[in-house]
């Protein structure tokens, strides 16, 4: 006769215990790497700062690059270092030639950091000095960066800059330095921040005035957008479907750089012809 | 147990340690000069910043990164080879394991140091512990390399204990240090039991650690989106390259040690020959992997990936690239294929070629890809400066100097293991052979009912020609009446 009796539960064998421990550790490791393959999703409506640059309007005057340098205390490398490939331009003006003589055309292209929604630079930073803010700005903690340059090597757009030496400023520049932006020491990486100091300032202003932030407040907020005489650069909230950047983003002229990499840049270019076709 | 008391082994290993000739001082002072120059270069770089190097945008990495991968690769010589040989019980390993393990420890130190040298802010290194981001492959590297370094130190130290005890008992050299390191080892059976348990545990544990280290090093490149780096083959490719360059370094170290310490009586030509055969295998694997990588990249013909590939094949780096393939992979493979090529002078030629080629291989992974970023416009140029070369030379010289120093103060051949081998190898191998020695076949017996003889009885030639599995036919025929059975044959379609 067989009786079904409850036998006292056996203590887990060493093998079982080790297996469970291994599983737990693996689970913890997996759980702690959330941004690996997540599709960018907007749960509650958060701001998603973005920029639209109209290449058909751009005249290549480089006012944006100069204004950016002044606003963000970007040091001047000097002609020698610039020739060696070490100038720093948070807003870089590239001139790209297309075609062969005589059917030749030059396209001016202002390129700031793309502030990708899935940024390759953030994933590789060993000290979380590079991070993405709640409002989608890819920022850099200068005081934490160890200067390994993994982010600069990982950025498919080469939009990150390294301080190869102690930043130099002329005496006149030293007088005009912006107190809202920290000056970087040698040996750290720096990059465009969408002028987040100005975003913080305008948020405080509208709070003091007791109103909501509007598209008109931020449309020309970053130094590059503010200084563009051709009105080619517009800044705003890409998560707001009624903002000007969102409207322009839906234009058939809109494209982003290296879209197929899945980095989801938040800098949108407008051009009649698609880039390099 | 005559082998265990063979004090002539101890004498032969220890006496060259005690004799320090002018050549030692000459080599040491030359190496120290280079190290001093390297230190000067680093001091300059520390003070002025990485502006003293040739790196720029977009060539954010250069010689230091190549050095990092190279040194970590060299470190695979030792521990991995020694651990694998120990685990499989290869008797010829005994005189060469320590030679190999020391390479691992020092090469790892300089590999980790190459990363430190490459940092813009070495003063902030602790941030990796304070703010470490688990998702970054650099953090994986920090973990793997520190585990590997501590593991190889233990793995070097454990078999060293009986040997420093011998030195302590003889009262030669740095006796207080030896007394400290020997931990009171006297060779009692209990001590020996635990020692051997520890060694065999470490030998097994170190193999996956070593493989993880170079895989993770490859992830630094492979996890980015950069053309030419973003490849699934990089992990095994790096591991193979590491073992490949590691064995070459080990052969060079062995040849120098053997000559300087007159150890021909213990490191015999057969040791070089056997290692050379392993090296030949790794050379062929390396050629295979390289062929794979470039074939796939070239047939894919994706413009962003083709830019660095063409830079190597026909562009600015064509000479180092084809030099690496021809002079560093194919030529050594040819040398190693011949018995004469596996003698020490030829082996030295092959090993030096391989080491140079493997450094170039790492350089050619780092630089051409960064020269051609995905966005086509800021193409870069990179010329290393004398600061970078000085620091590189300093690292290599410091490595050689530390190796020399170790060989001066510690026995470079594991004396107790050699003696143990002399005493126990033959009985052990004999006992092992007894296990798999063929025995004359026993006469066929009916055992479990399904003996071959039973099936054979029911397998007719007719069933065989019908192409059916014999057993099935056999069962069916057994069930069928004899009259039907007779019909079965070629052309008996009715059945």
Image (tube, rainbow, N blue to C red):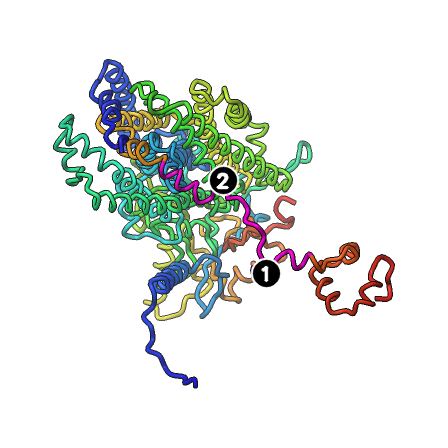
The image quadrant that residue B21 belongs to is: top left
Residue that badge 1 annotates: A250
Q: Chain of mark 2?
A: B
Q: Is residue B348 left or right of residue A273?
A: left
The image quadrant that residue B493 belongs to is: bottom right
Q: Secondary structure at mark 1?
A: loop
Residue nearer the viewer, B92 or B330: B92
Q: Residue at x 31, y 51 (%)?
A: A180
Cα distance between the residues tagged 2 and 1: 45 Å
The location of residue B404, given as percent across then percent down, is 27, 25
The answer to whether residue B117 of the structure is visible from this angle is no
Residue B237, disc: 2
The answer to whether residue B364 of the structure is visible from this angle is yes
- Residue farthest top in this picture: B22
Q: Residue at x 28, y 40 (%)?
A: B153
The image quadrant that residue B13 belongs to is: top left
The location of residue B16, given as percent across then percent down, is 24, 20
Residue segment shown in magenta: B427-456
Marks 2 and 1 in Cβ contact (< 8 Å) = no
């Amino acid at each position: 006769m067989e009786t079904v009796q409850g036998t006292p539960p056996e203590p887990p064998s060493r093998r079982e215990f080790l297996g469970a421990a291994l599983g737990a550790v693996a689970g913890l490791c997996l759980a702690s790497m959330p941004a690996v393959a997540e599709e960018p999703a907007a749960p509650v409506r958060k701001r998603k700062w973005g920029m639209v640059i109209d290449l058909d309007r751009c005249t290549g005057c480089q006012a944006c690059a100069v204004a950016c340098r002044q606003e963000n205390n970007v040091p001047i490398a000097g002609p020698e270092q610039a020739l060696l490939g070490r100038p720093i331009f948070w807003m870089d003006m590239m001139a790209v030639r297309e075609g062969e003589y005589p059917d030749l055309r030059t396209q001016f292209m202002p390129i700031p950091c793309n502030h990708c929604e899935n940024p390759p630079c953030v994933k590789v930073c060993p000290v979380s000095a590079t991070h993405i803010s709640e409002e989608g700005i890819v920022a850099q903690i200068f005081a934490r960066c160890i200067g390994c340059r993994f982010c600069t090597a990982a950025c498919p757009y080469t939009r990150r800059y390294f301080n190869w030496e102690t930043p130099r400023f002329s005496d006149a520049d030293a007088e005009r330095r912006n107190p809202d932006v920290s000056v970087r020491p040698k040996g750290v990486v720096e990059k465009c921040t969408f002028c987040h100091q100005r975003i913080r300032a305008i948020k405080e202003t509208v709070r003091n005035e007791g109103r909501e932030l509007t598209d008109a407040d931020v449309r020309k907020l970053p130094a590059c957008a503010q200084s563009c005489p051709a009105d080619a650069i517009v800044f705003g909230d890409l998560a707001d479907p009624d903002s000007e950047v969102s409207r322009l983003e839906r234009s058939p002229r809109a494209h982003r750089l290296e879209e197929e990499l899945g980095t989801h840049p938040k800098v949108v270019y407008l051009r009649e012809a698609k880039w390099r076709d | 147990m005559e082998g265990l008391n063979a004090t002539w082994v101890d004498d032969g290993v220890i006496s060259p340690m005690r004799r320090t000739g002018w050549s030692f001082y000459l080599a040491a002072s030359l190496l120290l000069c280079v190290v001093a120059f390297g230190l000067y270069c680093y001091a300059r770089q520390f003070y002025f910043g990485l502006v003293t190097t040739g790196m720029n945008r977009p060539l954010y990495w250069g010689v230091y990164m190549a050095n990092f991968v190279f040194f970590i690769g060299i470190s695979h010589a030792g521990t991995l080879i020694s651990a694998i040989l120990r685990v499989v019980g290869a008797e010829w390993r005994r005189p060469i394991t320590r030679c190999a393990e020391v390479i691992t420890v020092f090469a790892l130190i300089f590999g980790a140091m190459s990363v430190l040298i490459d940092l813009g802010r070495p003063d902030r290194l602790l941030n990796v512990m304070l703010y470490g981001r688990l998702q970054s492959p650099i953090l994986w590297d920090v973990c793997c390399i520190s585990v590997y370094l501590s593991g190889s130190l233990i793995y070097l130290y454990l078999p060293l204990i009986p040997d420093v005890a011998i030195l302590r008992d003889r009262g030669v050299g740095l006796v207080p240090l030896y007394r400290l390191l020997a931990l009171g080892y006297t060779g009692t059976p209990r001590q020996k039991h635990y020692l051997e348990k520890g060694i065999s545990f470490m030998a097994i544990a170190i193999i996956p650690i070593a493989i993880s280290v170079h895989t993770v090093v490859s992830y630094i490149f492979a996890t980015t989106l950069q053309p030419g780096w973003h490849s699934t083959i990089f992990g095994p490719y790096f591991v193979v390259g590491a073992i490949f360059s590691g064995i070459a370094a080990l052969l060079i170290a062995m040849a120098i040690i053997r000559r300087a310490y007159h150890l021909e009586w213990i490191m015999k030509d057969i040791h070089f020959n056997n290692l050379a055969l392993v090296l030949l295998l790794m050379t062929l694997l390396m050629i295979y992997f390289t062929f794979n990588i470039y074939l796939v990249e070239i047939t894919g013909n994706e413009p962003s990936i083709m830019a660095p590939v063409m830079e190597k094949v026909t562009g600015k780096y064509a000479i180092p690239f084809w030099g690496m393939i021809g002079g560093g992979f194919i030529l050594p493979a040819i040398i190693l294929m011949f018995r004469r090529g596996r003698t020490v002078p030829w082996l030295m030629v092959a090993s030096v070629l391989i080491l140079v080629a493997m450094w170039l291989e790492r350089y050619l992974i780092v630089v051409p890809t960064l020269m051609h970023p995905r966005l086509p416009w800021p193409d870069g140029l990179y010329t290393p400066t004398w600061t970078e070369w000085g620091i590189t030379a300093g690292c290599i010289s410091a490595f050689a100097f530390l190796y020399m120093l170790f060989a001066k103060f510690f026995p470079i051949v594991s004396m107790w293991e050699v003696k143990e081998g002399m005493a126990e190898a033959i009985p052990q191998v004999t006992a092992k052979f007894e296990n798999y020695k063929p025995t004359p076949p026993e006469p066929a017996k009916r055992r479990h009912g399904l003996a071959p003889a039973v099936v054979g009885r029911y397998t007719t030639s007719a069933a065989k020609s019908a192409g059916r599995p014999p057993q099935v036919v056999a069962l069916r025929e057994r069930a069928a009446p004899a009259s039907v059975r007779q019909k079965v044959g070629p052309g008996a379609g009715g059945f």
